[in-house]
Image (cartoon, grey):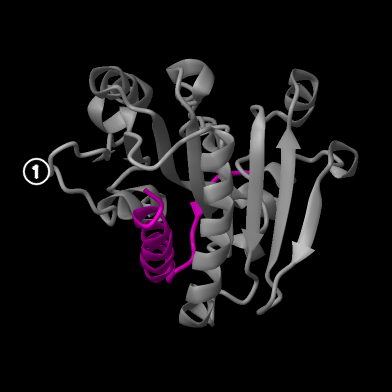
Amino acid sequence: MTDLIDECGQDLTDCGYETIKLAKFDMTCSKLLVDNKHKAKKLGFDMGHYFILNAPKLSYLMEEHRELLIAEIACRMEFLLKENKIKKKSKILYVGIGNPDILADCFGVFSAEKIAIDPYKKNNSIYKIIPNTFSNTGINAYEIIRLIVEAFDISAVILFDSLATSNLGRLGCSIQFNDAGLTPGSAMNNFGMAINKSSLNVPCMSIGVPMMISSKSFGAKREIILAEKDVKERIEFLSSVVAEVCNGLM
């Protein structure tokens, strides 16, 4: 199992996969609509709209990318909200998936922490949680999210998560977002329960950044999960960009 849809090992051309070049820094945006069960089974991904921003120069030009990243992410997230009929003032639950004890797995945690909420505001419509991992709590993240969705009549769930990649050059340099939700730990063979519209009965969007790579991608027999040494700096930057976009959406 892989996290990035264009690393699924399938030829995506016939599936409608498209890539466009953006204005600066050799950035590109790829998109794919998985619109039927046959295509979903073939690719191993749930049905939905997928976008991937690739920024190959991000590792050494972070702040220079900020304005362009914010504009591109906002454009695609606004599209996903519109496609799923999510309106202003809808009740949104932001979820930071990941293990707070493992830095490379903290993109979701850092992003959720930066989401602005006003719990004392009358008719507050923005909520956020960081459910931690099953290994730390004994509770599946899906179960926590389901209970909150039902109790607070949530209209949509937006999830943040660190992803895994098989391409060293994509560590911290790609952003995937979709309205297909996610399955925590799927790329590391640590299968949680799927968090998506089918399981929660509300639209589920996810934003993920590949922060981890398996040593098996380099031909190693023993699997070790690797991350860049400057992973904290990259996560701090990307989580601030993503949170700024989300704070301006609703």
Q: Label 1: which residue?
A: 120
Which residue lies most toward the left here?
120
Depicted 181 relative to depicted 22: above or below: above
Residue 46's x, y, as percent?
Answer: 64, 27
Residue 56 shown left or right of residue 86 in the figure: right
Residue at horizontal 37 percent and vertical 40 percent from the top: 97
Residue at 65% x, 71% y: name it. 56
Element marked by disc 1:
loop
Out of 141 and 21, give the one closest to the viewer: 21
The magenta segment is 221-250
Q: Is residue 86 above or below residue 36?
A: below
| Left or right: 213 in relation to 239 | right
Give the camera-side residue of 179 and 86.
86
Percent of width and height locating residue 194: 49, 23
In reply to whether residue 230 is colored magenta, the answer given is yes
From the top left corner, tell me how far across and down residue 189 is, in percent. Answer: 54, 31
- Residue at 53% across / 76% down in the picture? 65
Q: Percent x, y for residue 41? A: 74, 22
Q: Look at label 1 and name its amino acid.
A: Tyr
As for residue 249 lying within the magenta part, the answer is yes
Q: Is residue 14 visible?
A: yes
Depth check, front residue: 150 or 239: 150
Q: Residue at x 34, y 55 (%)?
A: 247
Q: Is residue 220 visible?
A: no
Quarter of the rendering occupied by the N terminus: top right
